[in-house]
Image: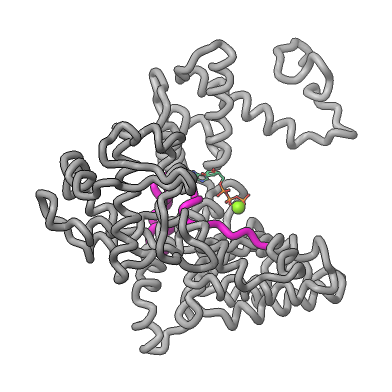
Amino acid sequence: MTDPALDVITFILTVRSFNANQALDEQDLPPEHRRVFWEGGEIERPIAATTEGIRQATGVERPWDAVSGLMFTERDDFTGAIKLADAAMAESWFFDRVGAEQLQANPTLAYAYADDVDGEVDYEEARAANRSIRADRVWIDSLLAEYFQDEEDEDMLDLVDVRAPEEIEMTLDDLVLTAAQEEEIRKIVKAIEYRDYLGAIGLREIGKLLFVGPPGTGKTTASRALAEELDLPFVEVKLSMITSQYLGETAKNVDKFFEVAKRLAPCILFIDEFDFVAKTRRSDEHAAIKRAVNTLLKSIDEVSLIRDEVLLIGATNHPDELDAAAWRRFDEIVNFPKPDEPMRADILRVVTRQMDISDFDPEEIAAATEGLTGSDLRMVLREAVLEALTENRRTVTQEDLLAAVREFEERDTLRDLDMIDGDHEALVAGGGGHSHEHH
Ligand SMILES: Nc1ncnc2c1ncn2[C@@H]1O[C@H](COP(=O)(O)OP(=O)(O)OP(=O)(O)O)[C@@H](O)[C@H]1O
Ligand SMILES: [Mg+2]
């Protein structure tokens, strides 16, 4: 479907219209176009369609080869920029090939050419539907570069992982959620949408969620998917990291990652391994770490979705270890249980959407996988696919899946073994999974 010449000309016409209309800004450029021009926190006019820029924006490796055969193009030998020798001819070539739909997806072109194509084109709508610049990696990078310039700051950026929504691969569509989880997500989406109203009526204690549940139940994935859904940058912190280096600086580091979040706001601040807080308060940890944890609790009190536009999500595998002080700072607790049988079947259906499976019966596998998490089911699937590939098969069978389930369970038994004192048969080569007669 993609036509390299059309992609290149679309880009060149966009550049041209953007330069010609001062009223347009970065929010009018499609994300793949504007990332080429976003520099130091802005787009400076005039922008130009250089060979490298076209390559980045369109993915066309040899842009000039794609359009040199058209009568209205020319290349500046010195800069390598591709230009239109005859703009009117280029436009009519373009209108022969695109309709309202393509213009609607590009606010700059919608602004410039709404009247030149058949069909309804609405510039305001196109602009509103265009993804926010805040979801772009380049936007996040330029902001971080601006605020965190010296070396010490750069070290601190190692402690947090900032992800752009455009980089998040698994979306809410890829997750099977419980009804209660969906309800919480709906609430938080509304709270963000109506945050001015909530502030006005004095409801400020909103927007701090704690996700609790065993490993592999989707806590991290759901948090990221929420960032993708809401087009918000995702700032991720692992609490155990704050102690791994610069002991004396830990309290300051905690302050800093809240600062990163406030600078990027509106955003999601995800604090993983939240049980770390409780652990350090109980044990005889270094005083610096205790100070850091107290700073953390204080910062959590001070940050607000309504005022700072930071949505805080904590996650833990050990809710039982959290003390009251940590617990009461969250206004919603969201449970991530191990999936029950119907949910396991749904997860299997979702994770196999792109695959070809013969005799696929997700219910049968769900019935055989009591106690497995979403993450475990993914692992089972991966195993089945690899196993089939060893026989050069791209089609996985139901039998492959069931075999992978059995194998997974064996793995699980191995994990529970005491490797030093154990005298379990699986620890002796030739024993384990094979059928022996020594019982
Ligand atoms: N309900 C689910 N639906 C679809 N996929 C799931 C589900 N739960 C887990 N997974 C998959 O399992 C993998 C691991 O999930 P994730 O890392 O989000 O778990 P987690 O709860 O954060 O675990 P941990 O406590 O170890 O950090 C992901 O690839 C995710 O897609
Ligand atoms: Mg996780």
Q: Quick check: is 371 in the magenta stretch?
A: no
Q: How many marks?
A: 0
Quadrant of the snapshot with the N terminus: top left
Q: Position of residue 140 (x, y in %)?
A: 54, 63
> 230 or 301, which is in the foreground?
230
Residue in the image at 57% along x and 37% along y: 376
Residue in the image at 19% along x and 56% along y: 113
Query: Is residue 140 found left or right of 184 in the rendered image?
Result: right
Q: Is residue 28 above or below residue 251?
A: above
Q: Is residue 2 above or below residue 52?
A: above
Residue in the image at 47% along x and 71% along y: 266
- In the current view of this chain or complex, which residue is farthest to the right? 421
Figure colour scheme? one colour
Q: Position of residue 424 (x, y in %)?
A: 81, 26
> 169 or 422, which is in the foreground?
169
> 268 or 35, which is in the foreground?
35
Part of the protein shown in magenta = 160-185
Q: Position of residue 432 (x, y in %)?
A: 75, 20
> 347 or 309, which is in the foreground?
309
Residue in the image at 28% along x and 66% along y: 21
Q: Position of residue 180 (x, y in %)?
A: 41, 59
Query: Is residue 45 found left or right of 271 in the rendered image?
Result: left
Query: Is residue 148 found left or right of 221 in the rendered image?
Result: right
